[in-house]
Amino acid sequence: MAQILDPLPSNYQNGIVCCYVNATSKIQVVRISNIPNWHFERVVFPGQRLVFESMPQGLLEVHTGMIASAILSDKIPCITLRIDMELNDSEDEDAEMGEVATTESAQKELVNLQR
C-alpha cells in the first residue's frame, strides 16, 4: 500500500501499515524522521485516527501543544502501531468477510487521510 504524498523510498521492501490515535484534547504533529531519504509528518486532531505506512524500524515522534508551541511528548516504535492487513486462513467465511471489510475500511481511511 503506497502513500500518495510521502511514499516509502523504492529501495524499502518491508513496509508495514500502522495506526495512531490522538487520545488527547490537543492538536498533535506526528513525524517519522529516522528513515533515510524519507520524511513523514502529519497533523492529528483530537480523537482522530491516523493510518499510515512506515518501515518497522520507524520511530513516530508525537509533538503535542498549542498553535505557537509544541512539546515532544512521546516516541513510539512503529512496529508497536502495526495493524494486521492480512486474512487468517483458519477462520470461517463470515470472519473473513468481516476482516475484508475492515481492511477495505482501513485502506479507504488511509486514502481519505492523504487528501
Image (cartoon, grey):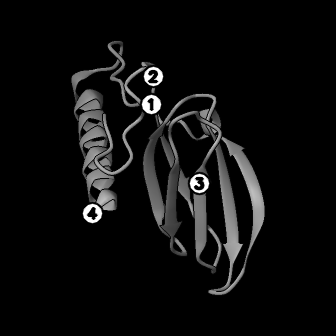
Q: Please name the amino acid that badge 1 sits on.
A: Asp
Q: Earlier in the sequence, mark 4 or mark 1?
A: 1
Mark 4, Cα crowd under 10 Å, few <14 / some 14-19 / many 20+, is few
Q: What element does badge 2 sit on?
A: loop
**Spatial distance from mark 4 to mark 1, Cα to Cα?**
23 Å
Distance from label 2 to label 3 (Cα)? 18 Å
Can you tell which quarter of the image residue 17 is in?
top left
72 relative to 90, above or below: below
Marks 2/3 in contact by CB < 8 Å: the verdict is no
Residue at 28% of width from left, 47% of height from top?
4
Q: Which residue is mark 2?
A: 12
Which residue has dot 4 on it? 115
> Is 83 above or below relative to 108?
above
**How far across and how far down the image is residue 93, in percent?**
22, 24
Of mark 2 and mark 3, the one earlier in the sequence is 2
Question: What residue did someone put label 3 on?
Answer: 31
Q: Is residue 45 above or below residue 63?
A: below
For the residues labelled 3 and 1, the Cα–Cα distance comes to: 21 Å
Q: Amino acid at mark 2?
A: Tyr
| Image quarter in which the N terminus is found | top left
